[in-house]
Image (cartoon, rainbow, N blue to C red):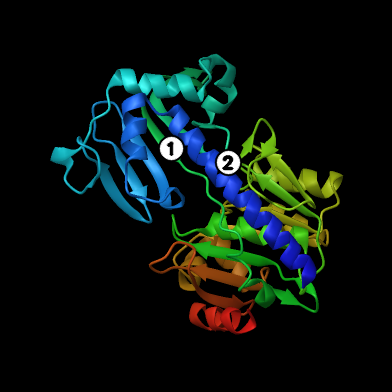
């Protein structure tokens, strides 16, 4: 218990410091007027999830799961008529800030449609696509930016982790969630807990394939999120190649991947499992019935590849609705897990 308390205390202090740095980084990339307007908002930074900037269009942002316009005179608004519209010059200023005045230096990342900046914030980019041999070479005339803010929610996996263990080891686990319900946030915290270890399970060597740089949020190769000190990460690597590479080269005890779904993904998952490595993955879905109805994923359920399914859904982001076993039988509801967490605290 003492080990968890030490790690938890240290992680909490580090998280608070990271949040301050992340807040400063977001304000650094905004034009002066926009920066001032956001700083004057009566909101808490950890609740700010997304800022959307489009040339000549109202500035939109998502706060605690709700969408708002940025008012012309400041403040939050539901009325587009009173919203502040960003100019082309202001958006170009943001682009210069996020690329350190050299877009060409980020050409490889631009092919993927996003940049990751210090603090782990990921900025999606849209504009004129430039092709070369039918492949995306880069994006020019950028007119739309989607700033997705990085936040860590330490401890969100503590309540569910004991239910994912069997005979002292991790079960092959799939997190099922609709978009924007916190599946990557939960995955990230489970990776951290497994890597550090806890009273329920000793620390595990975890290999992470972070194809879209959302789990570790690497900036110049260094994870901006706390994934534990027994974690190895392949940033920007395709899932299939990454899983096989980790098995061959890093001897992981657990492999974690985000958003599986293709036949190639499934083949790689089966390779991981046949190698004796535990699997922790996520998938888009509205529940067990939805997963069973999909041709590729349905086969995994029928063949009992995964031993645990965590289904997210509810009013709060990251809210656990249900946990199922390999047969699809209900093990616990979110309310039951909450009660268990409260009683054990």
Numbered circle sitting on residue 147: 1
Mark 2 lies on residue:
212
- Residue 106: image location, x then y, percent: 57, 21
Numbered circle sitting on residue 338: none
Residue under the image location 49 percent in, 63 percent down: 318
Residue under the image location 32 percent in, 49 percent down: 42
From the viewer's side, name the closer residue of 200 and 327: 200
On screen, residue 126 versus residue 156, left or right, reads left
Element at badge 1? strand
Vertical comparison of 170 with 101: above or below = below
Residues at marks 1 and 2, CA–CA distance in whole angstroms: 14 Å
Please name which of the two marks, 1 or 2, marks the residue nearer to the observer: 1
- Residue 82: image location, x then y, percent: 15, 39
Residue under the image location 51 percent in, 34 percent down: 25
Residue under the image location 69 percent in, 37 percent down: 222
Which of pointers 1 and 2 lies earlier in the amino acid sequence?
1
Vertical comparison of 7 with 130: above or below = below
């Amino acid at each position: 218990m003492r080990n968890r308390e030490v790690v938890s205390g240290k992680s909490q202090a580090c998280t608070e410091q990271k949040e301050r740095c992340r807040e400063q980084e977001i304000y650094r990339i905004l034009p002066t007027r926009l920066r001032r307007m956001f700083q004057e908002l009566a909101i808490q930074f950890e609740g700010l999830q997304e800022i959307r900037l489009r040339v000549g269009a109202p500035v939109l942002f998502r706060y605690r799961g709700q969408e708002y316009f940025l008012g012309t005179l400041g403040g939050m608004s539901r009325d587009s008529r009173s919203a502040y519209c960003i100019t082309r010059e202001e958006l170009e200023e943001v682009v210069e800030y996020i690329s350190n005045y050299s877009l060409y230096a980020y050409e490889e990342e631009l092919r993927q449609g996003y940049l990751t900046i210090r603090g782990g914030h990921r900025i999606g980019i849209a504009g004129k696509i430039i092709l070369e041999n039918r492949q995306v070479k880069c994006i020019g005339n950028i007119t739309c930016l989607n700033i997705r803010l990085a936040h860590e929610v330490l401890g969100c996996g503590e309540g569910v982790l004991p239910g994912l263990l069997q005979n002292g080891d991790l079960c092959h686990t799939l997190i099922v969630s609709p978009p924007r319900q916190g599946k990557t946030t939960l995955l990230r915290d489970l990776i951290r807990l497994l890597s550090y270890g806890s009273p329920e399970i000793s620390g595990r060597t975890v290999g992470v394939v972070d194809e879209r740089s959302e789990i570790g949020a690497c900036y110049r190769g260094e994870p901006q999120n706390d994934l534990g000190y027994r974690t190895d990460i392949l940033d920007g690597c395709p899932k299939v190649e990454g899983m096989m590479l980790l098995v061959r080269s890093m001897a992981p005890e657990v492999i974690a991947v985000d958003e599986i779904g293709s036949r190639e993904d499934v083949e790689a998952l089966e390779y991981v499992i046949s190698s004796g490595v535990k699997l922790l993955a996520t998938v888009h879905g509205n529940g067990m019935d939805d997963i069973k109805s999909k041709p590729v994923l349905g086969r995994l359920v029928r063949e009992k590849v995964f031993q645990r399914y965590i289904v997210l859904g509810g009013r709060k982001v990251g809210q656990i609705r249900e946990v199922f076993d390999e047969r699809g039988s209900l093990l616990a509801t979110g309310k039951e897990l909450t009660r268990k967490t409260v009683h054990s605290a």
